Amino acid sequence: MAFDILKRNNVKIKGQGTQPMMFAHGFGCDQNMWRHIAPVFEPDYRLILFDFVGSGQSDIAAYDPLRYDDLNGYAQDVLDICQALELTNVVFVGHSVSSMIGLLAAIQQPQFFDRLIMIGPSPRYLNEAPDYVGGFERPDVDELLALMDQNFVRWANTLAPAIMGNADQPALGAELTQSFCSTDPLVMQQFARITFLSDNRQDLPKLTVPSLILQSSDDIIAPQVVGEYTHQHLPLSTLRYMKANGHCPHLSAPEETIALMQTYLFDTKKI
């Protein structure tokens, strides 16, 4: 059973340390997106890298549209891996929607987790007048999802570079576009809907695990006001503003991302 889970999620284990550090990729990505970050932590941690079912080199035959019809299905992937490897004291590093997936997993089974590191988290992508700004109006998201259904390649070529930002590094936008296009369109369409329409604002206060929020500048997916809202409603959270811009600082500014992670892990270990 444990082997099946590790195969299903293409789990890779690296590192010389004992404390587990689990890396969870964002929407339309895979574990390769951590290639600039993860190796730095190999001497001190036991690294757990994986692909969500339907992404990367996971077992696409394991994809169940009913299970993955909300973020809890992906949170169960995380918990399944923790159980299969008998993990405890996990430092969970999640990018974008995986921040909320990690949140849901840690709420359900907090005994597995030591700290969460959230890169560009958002509990709600849609604006909810008059009290919440998520960055998107519902008609804009509906139009985005409609384009995805009608012309997947055009959608990927339009959205990926905007998400990445850093127009001076076009190779990054091209990489994200290719990542989007290499994922099964039907999986992407369902994952996009549950991502952009999810609302985890009520879940934030339920987290009992300490967390770090890394907030990029000029992030169209998770603008600064969203990071601040998340910090205000997430107990035991630390917010750090980044000089990096765009939604993927682990790719565009790995050195800054690593430095902020290391500082947080060192400072909280002393407490």
Image: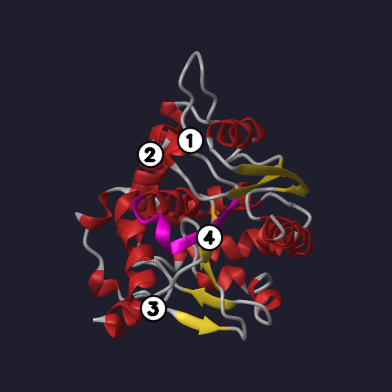
Q: Marks 1 and 3: which is nearer the front?
A: 3
Residue 173 coordinates in the image, percent (x, y): 64, 58
260 left or right of 24?
Answer: right
Does the stretch in magenta take in 61? no
Q: Nearer the viewer, residue 205 or 142?
A: 205
Does the stretch in magenta take in 117? yes
Locate residue 85: give its quadrant: bottom left
Give me the C-alpha separation between circle 4 and circle 3.
16 Å
Give me the C-alpha separation between circle 1 and circle 3.
33 Å
120 left or right of 188?
Answer: right
Q: Nearer the viewer, residue 80 or 180?
A: 80
Q: Marks 4 and 2: which is nearer the front?
A: 4
Q: Quadrant of the N terminus?
A: bottom left
Q: Give me the disc on residue 198.
A: 2
Label 2 sits on a secondary structure element that is loop
Residue 49's place in the image compared with 183, above or below, is below
Tag count in the figure?
4
Q: Give me the disc on residue 114.
A: 4
Q: Amino acid at mark 1?
A: Tyr
Circle 3 is placed at which residue position? Answer: 85
Give me the C-alpha separation between circle 2 and circle 1.
8 Å
| Residue depicted at 67% across the width and 63% down the height | 251
Q: Amino acid at mark 2?
A: Ser
Residue 77 coordinates in the image, percent (x, y): 34, 64
Q: Count neighbours of disc 1 (C-alpha within 10 A) and say few if under 14, some if 14 to 19, many if 20 or more.
A: many
Residue 141's place in the image compared with 53, above or below, is above
| Residue depicted at 52% across the width and 40% down the height | 122
Give me the C-alpha separation between circle 3 and circle 2.
29 Å
Q: Give me the disc on residue 125.
A: 1
Q: Amino acid at mark 4?
A: Asp
208 left or right of 220?
Answer: left
